[in-house]
Amino acid sequence: MTDSARGLSPTTISSLLVDTSPYLSCDDCFAQIDEYVERKIADPHYEDPAMKAHLAGCGACAEEAETLRELLSQDAG
Amino acid sequence: MTTVNRAIPAVTPAPPSDDTWLADLTDDGPAGQQALLRLRELLVRASRHQVWRLRDLLPGAGAGDLEDMAQQAANDALVAVLRQLGTFEGRSRFTTWAYKFGVLHAGVAVRREAWRHREVPLPDTLALVADRSPAPEAHSEAAQLARAVQAAIAGELTPHQRRVVLALLVEDVPIDVLADRLGSTRNALYKTLHDARRRLRAALIDGGYIDARPNRSTP
């Protein structure tokens, strides 16, 4: 058995306790992420609760969404 | 007599429509070859952007290494796009739909490379160093919450949930890297993480440390 001796920073605690409901899988997030990012750019107030919850709880998917947003913003600029 | 060279204004061709992309990519002739080249250029742009965004994860990599990684990721993404072409439903522009494959493959490639020579920590328990401190701040609200979270991790999670939670969220192992290490998938690990978070939140709500409103996890 091994221990993690790292402390629990406020950021880590937030990531441990973030509410990721309603559940959405990474595959379903990937299936929708192009449409979601386009809609968010067109209307910053647009929201999809399941996508929002997933992106709050999955760093890899959130990173990909941000990169996609940057690419589309560059294309538009 | 002086000859005047009049510059002919460059005309930028209109970008292909989604229907054109789909028709050309399924064409066996020259139009198909041109479309493949355009698609690969688009995927290189996406993968290169992602590789450079994540370059801090690869401190030893030079520009050539990053470009090689972007080109390889674009090749992998091209195969994925062509394989899944039939699933494109037009809910976004085709170019946006294609970009996401380049971004995905580049991100996975960078994270895997960053951890290629690192041991993936898989702790079974969490030891809070702060617990041993008699300092006044150890009794603060934040310290109480940290201890409550530690207790919930120890008492509310299954061994598998605990291992996944500690590796992903405390040791910061990327989810793709952990999936490789455990012979699992990103999907399966995220589901484990989701279920574990529900248990942790329920325990902390029961204990009065957080309220039941979403994403109000810290004081």
Image (cartoon, coloured by chain):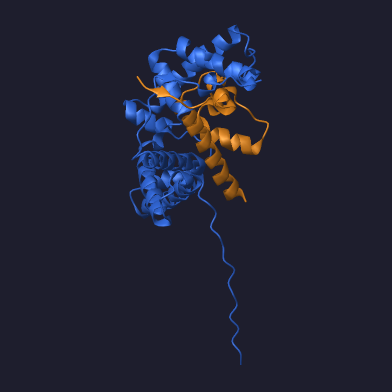
Chain colours: A orange, B blue
- Where is residue B218? Give x, y as percent: 63, 21
Q: Viewed as shown, does residue A73 lie left or right of B171?
A: right
Dividing the picture into quadrants, the one containing residue B63 is bottom left
Residue sitting nearer the eye, B91 or B71:
B71
Residue at image location 40% in from the left, 32% down from the top:
B176
Q: Is residue B108 above or below residue A8?
A: below
Q: Viewed as shown, does residue B29 lie left or right of B167?
A: left
- Where is residue B137? Give x, y as percent: 63, 22
Q: Residue furthest bottom?
A: B1
Dividing the picture into quadrants, the one containing residue B168 is top left
Q: Residue furthest front?
A: B134
Residue at image location 62% in from the left, 51% down from the top:
A77
Residue sitting nearer the eye, B193 or A39:
B193
Residue at image location 66% in from the left, 35% down from the top:
A43
- Where is residue B75? Give x, y as percent: 36, 47
- Where is residue B59? Give x, y as percent: 44, 48
Q: Viewed as shown, does residue B168 lie left or right of A68?
A: left
